[in-house]
Amino acid sequence: MSQSQSTADILILGAGVIGASTAFHLARRRPGRVMVLERSGVAHGGSGRSSALIRMHYSYPLEVQLAVKSLETFRHWPEIVGGPDDFRQTGFIRIVPAPETDRLRANVAMQQELGVNTRLITRQELRELQPAWRVDDVELAAYEPDSGYGDGAGVATGFLARARELGVEYRPGVQVTSLRVEGDRVRGVETAAGLIEAPVVLVATGPWTRPLLEPIGVTLPLETEYHEVAFLKNPPALPSVGAACIDSILHLYFRPEVGGLTLVGSFYGPRGADPDHFPESPSKESLAAMAAGVTSRIPALEEAGVAFGVTGIYDMSPDSRPLLGEVSGVAGLHVAVGFSGMGFKISPAVGLLMSELLLDGRASSLDITPLRPGRFAEGRPIIAPYAYHCD
């Protein structure tokens, strides 16, 4: 490997939606030699297994701002990034238990102040919007007509393809074995093919992050969590379930899928999963439970059949929010990890903000200081003012 091949100005580890988005936004500013290293292929981790909901409803204002900024990219993908647009605007509905309707009201008011097209809807309005749903247990819901869903693999691939057109170098099949640190600075990475030197390294490696950082003395409070999703084949009487939905009464989320399918996922899963060795398909019991759960909301799905299932691994942080920024004590080493299942829907904004941080020393489009990696060591986890019990 020649000297020109073994150096970069910025190294990005991971070609999922976060790494690819950052590469795209860096490339637009022509910052020098940007290189993306990926152990397998683009979107072969969590991005390719994402349920890919696109929604603005969060209980923490910065999350809302990240989602709002990202929605603009999803809605105008051909003009901003180029290539096919995988965004499907179905609308989005947030359902909470009756004791949390005051929190719902407060969060919708906050979201409206931040520019989200959202409103509260009564049980009767929800019934009119979604006549196939059983809503007797819903006192109040939130409705976002502009939201919907996308495609994780398509977004990662699209970002990276445009980044490469703008000069980013992409190296798939490169296993990073360790980070090279000298003194208090990162100097690059060791790979199976040798050393690649760089003064700036962004780690966007999801559930593989802790084993990469711990040998250099950096321990981030990240845990893996195993998740399962079912795809149901809609019966002829129900071509589509309508809007995407997060349902905190049932502890399920669901959305339509192309080809006459419905995607259904559960909120939680077991911790401590190995991202290299986990069941590739949900258990029959899990598929049956998810199907049974969603039929209590949409009775017509009782006639649906289970088409197939998908599994994946989240990288969870203690407050279920990402860690974005430079690692304390290692200059030049940055992370964008711990997305806790929300990475896809905010990936356009995160890529922009990380590019600003890497090039300018600070993120200027939004203040992401609250998401700094050191907040847990400081005893300052994020606590939303009107958090739901399932946040």
Image (cartoon, rainbow, N blue to C red):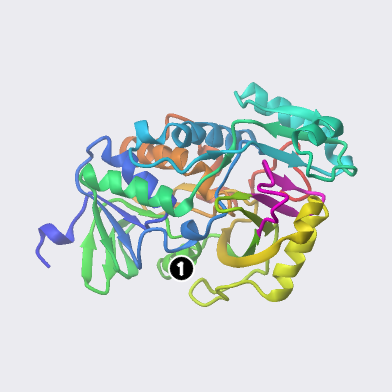
330 shown above or below 55: below
Nearer the observer, 216 or 316? 316
Name the residue at 23% across, 40% down.
Answer: 31
Nearer the observer, 333 or 277? 277
Residue 119: x and y in percent read 72, 26
Residue 365: x and y in percent read 44, 29
Visible in this render: residue 388? yes
Name the residue at 40% across, 36% down.
Answer: 77
Q: Main secondary structure of the magenta part?
A: loop
The stretch drawn in magenta includes residue 242? yes
Residue 257: x and y in percent read 58, 51
SS assignment at label 1:
helix
Visible in this render: residue 367? no
218 left or right of 197? right
124 shown above or below 10: above
Classed neighbour count for the residue bearing mark 1: other residues with Cα under 10 Å, few (<14), some (14–19), many (≥20): few
Q: Which residues are magenta?
A: 233-255
Residue 70: x and y in percent read 49, 36
Name the residue at 86% across, 31% down.
Answer: 124
The residue under label 1 is which amino acid type?
Glu
The stretch drawn in magenta includes residue 6? no
**Residue designated by label 1:** 214
68 shown above or below 150: above
Name the residue at 51% across, 45% down.
Answer: 150
- Which image quadrant: the N terminus? bottom left
268 left or right of 249? left
